[in-house]
Image (cartoon, coloured by chain):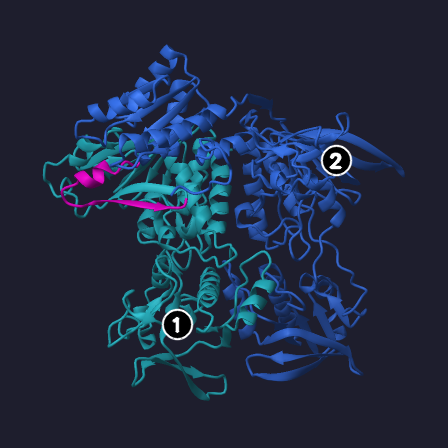
Chain colours: A cyan, B blue
Amino acid sequence: MKRYLVIGSGVAGGTAAGELARQGHKVFILESTGRIGGKVLSYCCKATDSCSRCGVCVAHDRIADALRHPRVSVMTGARIEKVESGGRATIVSGFFSNPRIAHNICTDCKACIEACPAGSISRYSRGGLTFTAIDYTSCLLQKGKKCSACADACPADAIRTAGGPKRRFTVAVDGVLIATGHETFNPVVKARLGYGRLPGVMTGLEAEQVLSRQDWLPAPVNGGGGDSAGVPARSVAFIQCVGSRDPRLKRNFCSSVCCAYALRMSRMLKARNPDMDIAVYYIDIQNFDKVFTPFRAELDRMGIRFVRGIPSAVARTGGQRLSLLIEDPEGKRATAEHDVVVLSIGVAPPEGAAEMASLFGLELDEFGFLRSNLAGVRVAGTCGEPQGIIDSIASARAAALELVR
Amino acid sequence: MTGIFLCTCRRKKDPSAWLERAAKSLAGIPFFPYDAMCAPEGIRFAAARVKGEKLDKLLLAGCAALLHEGYCERISRAAGIPASGIDAVVLPARASSAEAVRIIRRAHAALELIPRFEIRRVPLGQEVLVVGDGQVGAQTAREVAALGYRTTLIEKDAPAACAAAADVEILSPATLASLDGRPGAYTARLRTSREGERQETERVFGAVVIAAGAPGADTRAAPFSPGRVIPLADLEGSIERQPRRDWPRLVAIVLDFCVDEGRASTEAALRSALAVRERFRREVTVLLRDVRVAARGLEALYDQARVAGVTFVKHAGSPRIRSSREGVVVSCRDTVLGEDVEISCGLAAVSVDGLPACADPSLAAAAGIDLDAYGRLQQNNVHLLPELSNRQGVFVIGACRGEAYQPEVLRDARDAAFSVHALLSQKILKVELSHALVDGDRCAVCLTCVRVCPFKAMRIDENEKKADCIAESCRRCGICVGECPAKAITLPAYADAIVMARAGMAERPTIGAVGER
């Protein structure tokens, strides 16, 4: 039996942890927040009457697999402070936050949620994944108060507070997998697209969150909007490559995932609201499925409009609508009106990538993604390169192979 | 005997009278109330009662915590009862004792009917077969051999060109004729030919990895014509051999001729275009639907090609290619300009990946792997991506599956090696014998089940003259049960009587009385 450290509890980290544990190894997962699962938990299922193969459910199963395993320990609210080499082992030390939930013992009885005086404990449940999360920013123990209400209430003895709010740890492990995920591009930088300024302009991530609750996107009403209280948008534009393939932002790389999520989301919206006008503004569509041509043909048949070229600006019309300024290669200008504009924002390196690189002695590529040439340290998922859910799973398993052999 | 464990933790308000009534109605059934079944003490309590009262099944009743999979696993281990002998029901928080008893009785009746399944322990063979000796197959064979498995690599063309590790056995020319059996012990019939003599050998493998490479396309048929319209791969060869004076003024490279191509062809096209442009100073036009740059370094390569003066035409639908006096004319709809364009060139290179693809159908049939809508190996199913197939223990990677981009296929090779290791390193596969059962008296050997089973778990038992299910391959999906015209197949854990009992139908005299109120 070997011991491994997995940094990050998202798709890639969860997959690797579950696989390594299943092969008889002991795995520690470090998660910087109080909520495991990473970004994939806020993505919506994009099926219509048929599956669109987005992989969100697969990711949930993978993370659930890791959490339930008796040989996986999850340390939340964690931070690494020092990494040393100890012969063949890597010695990692830092701290994690209490209260800590032993997810493989938790029986989901909700007693801790009822007991918490600050309302810091919440429950996530979707598909095969159910777990309890702690918000350390509002937790009384973290604020220096003496509180162990959740631990006292837990009948399964799954919540621990021993060692105070920040408990120090040192582990010697045979291998480290870094899977800290990614940040999304902040579209405020591209001011002319109106994000944060014009109601009705939202990011792809925000659209995912809305669509995981309801079937439609809200159009701005009376200057408001952005919440689900609005009226359903009848015309939606997806603008691709926001913050991707853009040399002026020093981001001249493709984010790999935006065509996939935008096209799948547009298919879902159109299937549920056949009268809706949907336009996708793009440079090049990146094919993302094993059988892509029929998928793309289906979107054409459904009446989703593909417009080559990225609008240069979004403005508010006299009514409640948004006007997109489109310039063709010859400089001719045209406008198109929509109720809602979804910006397909790209993938950026994770926060703390530089810190992670210096702790472990890794390289950063020209865009800030992590790379490892060290035998005992592997990089998987989006912190190494922008990639989708299935590729993140595959990269995590390939990295796990390199660690065990 | 089934014991009922009732959790009373949610019944804070004097449960004794309630419990007394419940116990009275359940007289004759071992009944154990406890105030915290989900706690470790509750699990110990259940384990002790199981031992003391010689119980062989457990019914848990209480809150939703008892439904949790992890909890079921723990209590199963502690009490020594397989998961199929444990069931849990949720009692509504304010259920009357009569209501609770009704819910418990139904689940109890169903659980009593569930047979006690044997667990079969099957040894997993430690030999691995890799099909295909291309870069992907060789890489997989090396990875698998390095993990300590005896690895055999077969290649249909002779001689094998691969540089697999020394501890990999290589057979070539050899093909896979059939693959039968179960995960952990697949019987492969290998067809080899030695000195013109065809031989067939049977070998047993624990797992199989198929990396047969891209299917060969017919490069003599349209749109190809020798010297004028050539495969893109041949253009790469010409760049190395052909002197500058033999290059025409304009070279066209056509991608996405029929179907959308991936990053592998894009990279090849960009590299060839750059080479022709920079080495021979010729005009190059690349015609494609979209530039596929979704991988590290490809966007930079695309920028480099544009800076070097390569022209890109983004077409819609399929381009038309015809011969002309000077050479070749490629015409298409330019979606950037929004008009039809014609390009006259001396040489056109067309990527074969954009032609309607088709995997080796004999390999698919021999290996029992489904085909996708393009005719390549393995249906498009997100749960089976990127290397899993419809048969457990058989993995498919590389161009035969539809992914040819090199960094990706090398990753998939490691991924497949990991899957092989994850399966075979268990050494023993524990299989609960709750698979589909075929009634020999009813089975008409019509082959319906063999045809509909997505997992190749059904076969014909020649001795018994009936269909038979392989327990290790069966995933208890019930498709064969539903499709069998003779109603000869049952899933024992979902027999009619059990389903009826669970739905509360067993208490009723006639089947007609459906519905509660």
Q: Please give the name of the residue rendered at 43% of the width and 82% of the height, measured from the top-left corner.
A: A326
Q: Position of residue A212 (x, y in %)?
A: 37, 57
Is residue B35 visible in the rendered structure shown here? Answer: no
* Of labels 1 and 2, the one closer to you: 2
Nearer to us in this view, A216 or B235: A216
Q: Is residue B82 left or right of residue B135?
A: left
Quadrant where the N terminus of chain B sits is top left
Tell me the residue that label 1 is attached to: A248
Q: Chain of mark 1?
A: A
What's the amino acid at mark 1?
Arg
Nearer to us in this view, B452 or B419: B452
Q: Quick check: B307 above or below A86?
A: below
The quarter holding residue B210 reads: top right
Outermost residue toward the left in this view: A145
Tell whether position A118 is magenta. yes
The quarter holding residue A234 reads: bottom left
Tell whether position B53 is magenta. no
Magenta-drawn segment: A108-127
Q: Is residue B387 left or right of residue B67?
A: right
Q: Position of residue B346 (x, y in %)?
A: 74, 77
The quarter holding residue A109 reads: top left
Label 1, residues with CA under 10 Å away: few <14, some 14-19, many ≥20: few
Tell me the residue that label 2 is attached to: B445
Secondary element under disc 1, as helix, strand or loop, is helix
Outermost residue toward the bottom in this view: A332
Quadrant where the C terminus of chain B sits is top left
Q: Please give the name of the residue rendered at 44% of the width and 48% of the height, measured from the top-left corner.
A: A57
Q: Is residue B287 left or right of residue A146?
A: right
Q: Chain of mark 2?
A: B
